[in-house]
Amino acid sequence: MPPGAGPSSAGAGSASADDNDANRAPATSYGTNPAPTTPSPGMLAGVRVLDLGGIGPGPFATMMLADLGAEVIRLDPPTSIGQPMNPVLDRGKRSVTADFKTAEGIALAKAIAAGSDIVVEGFRPGAAERLGLGPDDLRALNPALVYGRITGYGQDGPKAQKAGHDLGYIASTGLLAQLGRADGPPQFPANLLGDFGGGGMLLVVGVLAGLTHARATGEGTVVDAAMVDGANLLYAMMHGFAAMGIWRHDARGRNLLDSGAPFYDVYPTADGRHLSVACIEPPFFAAFVRALDLEDDLPEPLGTLDHWNPQHWPALRALIAPAIAARSLAELDDLFTGVDACVEPVLTMAEAKHDEHNRARGLFATDAAGVDQPSPAPRFGGTSAPEPPRRAPQIGDDTAAVAAELSADRT
């Protein structure tokens, strides 16, 4: 597992109260940080964020805030000097060393928080309070502060103090049981749903909502972003479908959008590759069927066929699967070029980086250190492509500069 890429531990309810370096990634060298460039101001220009450290969802959230133009100052223990930041999750940030086991380190964190708009922490509930860096401690210095907390199970409840990771969070919400095929075990999409989609991204929504409130009222707030809450929220549409009678929570792999429907699935091709098929709506389904020359073999005439009816799914799958399996991925790609059928080849990451559309959009970027990574998103004002991400610092690169700035602010 690459440095800093794992699911949260400190950010998921397993950090100790006085151990702010427990989750430091192993050392790997990415070289030294070049002189910073001056990027165009982003939407969050003028916003200062204090990141108290961690791995996974917290740094992902502050990466997004940095991408949007915020000044993000991340605190790291001095014992980690010489180790790398995550070259992607920590892009565009400043790194300051602070030892939370000393009064000086706590004082430094408080001094930065006093001039910040947002603080993000991912410790086990209660740990920040024991350090003297809890919401009450910092909001006493800065009443408008938005204090973002990211954990696995939340700040309260029977599991609040339980250690965990993404897989356990989505398991405990019922979400994991929904993922996979009917004839197999539950499957999970890496650590994307709990740590990132339901964790870091939800935290960004929360702190920006809090910032809007703070700027309107002068009152800060505490954001309790639990990964179980966020992962559960991602499943909202399916709960709606269940209420409408078109989804069954107890029928993994037998529903409309979970590989149950033959028109929303991934199929193997003749050359061992895969084709994604997502022709849900009637016009797209009709275009798909005609492109594969299957119209005459349908169980009913295309004009009257209700392809959403599960009774037709076995017969449709029996037509679609061999038609795709008989062709290579390149043949299928050519066949569906210019056809609005919601069909895409399943690309490898290397292929995705060279895809014509992805290149035109600038989906991937390379920073000054040559690190390949996703480009910042979203875009604003019709910009054709985002600016290249700013390279992550080395740990402690900005300690002296931030100390000088704090000293200047006091004079």
Image (spheres, rainbow, N blue to C red):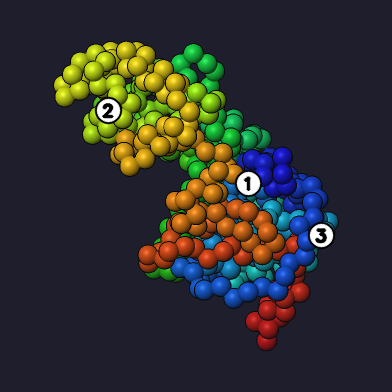
State the image quarter where residue 339 is shown. Answer: top left
The location of residue 226, given as percent across then percent down, is 53, 42
- For badge 2, the amino acid type reads Arg
Outermost residue on the left side: it is 304
Q: Please report whichever mark, 3 or 1, sits nearer to the chain's N-terminal start.
A: 1
Mark 3 or mark 2, whichever is nearer to me = 2
Q: Is residue 292 visible?
A: yes
Outermost residue on the bottom side: it is 411
Residue ID for mark 1? 56
Residue at x-position 45% and y-position 25%? 327
Q: Which of the image's four quarters has the C terminus?
A: bottom right
The location of residue 222, given as percent across then percent down, is 51, 55
Q: Which mark is residue 81?
A: 3
Circle 3 packing at 10 Å, graded few (<14), some (14-19), many (20+), is some
Of 19 and 217, nearer the camera is 19
Gap in Å between the C-alphas at discs 3 and 2? 61 Å
Instruction: Report if the CB atoms under discs 3 and 1 are less than 8 Å apart.
Output: no
Q: Please report whichever mark, 3 or 2, sits nearer to the chain's N-terminal start.
A: 3
